Amino acid sequence: MNLEPWIFSNDRLPPLRRGGLVPRVLTSISPCPLATNIAAISYVGRRVGESRAVIGAGLLYTLGRCLLYMALAVILAGTAMSIPAVSLFLQKYMHFVLGPVFLLLECSWSA
């Protein structure tokens, strides 16, 4: 049974879920978050006998991860919004900065 046409063109799902199903599944099994989640589960679950401690640690981990991703989004959005200003600054002043930087690098490498 070929599920690919059903996954990519299921009109019975709401529009927001229709396009996001496959990327979510692929993201959930990618190696980087998978290793992090395994490490977090093993850390959180080390006190299996204390259910409140496990639930509290899991909630704190989830909250921390959400706050981290939110901070990264704010930083990336702010950086993306200031790209023209950074470009103009570098065009005006980079040649003043590059000479002394290269001199310092050469002195540190030759010593």
Image: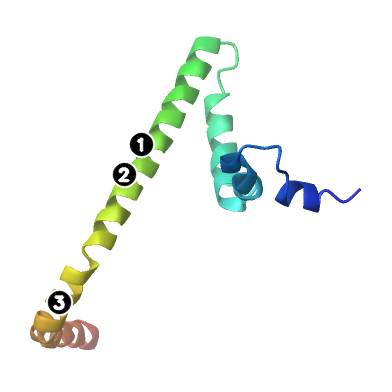
Q: Amino acid at mark 3?
A: Leu
In the rendered structure, the answer to whether residue 49 lies left or right of residue 61 reads right
Q: Tag 3 or tag 1, which sits nearer the N-term?
A: 1
Image quarter of residue 82: bottom left
Foreground mark, 3 or 2, reads 3
Q: Nearer the viewer, residue 24 or 64?
A: 24
Q: Amino acid at mark 1?
A: Leu
Q: CA distance from mark 2 to mark 1?
A: 6 Å
In the rendered structure, the answer to whether residue 106 lies left or right of residue 11 reads left
Q: Secondary structure at mark 2?
A: helix
Q: Is residue 55 above or below residue 87?
A: above
Q: Nearer the viewer, residue 74 or 42?
A: 74
* View extreme (right): residue: 1
Q: Nearer the viewer, residue 65 or 110?
A: 65
Can I make out residue 24 in this image?
no
Q: Are marks 2 and 1 in contact (CB under 8 Å)?
A: yes
For disc 3, the neighbor class at 10 Å (few under 14, some 14 to 19, many from 20) is few
Residue occupied by mark 1: 67
Residue 71 shows which numbered tag? 2
Q: Residue at x 58, y 31 (%)?
A: 42
Q: Are marks 3 and 2 in contact (CB under 8 Å)?
A: no
Residue occupied by mark 3: 88
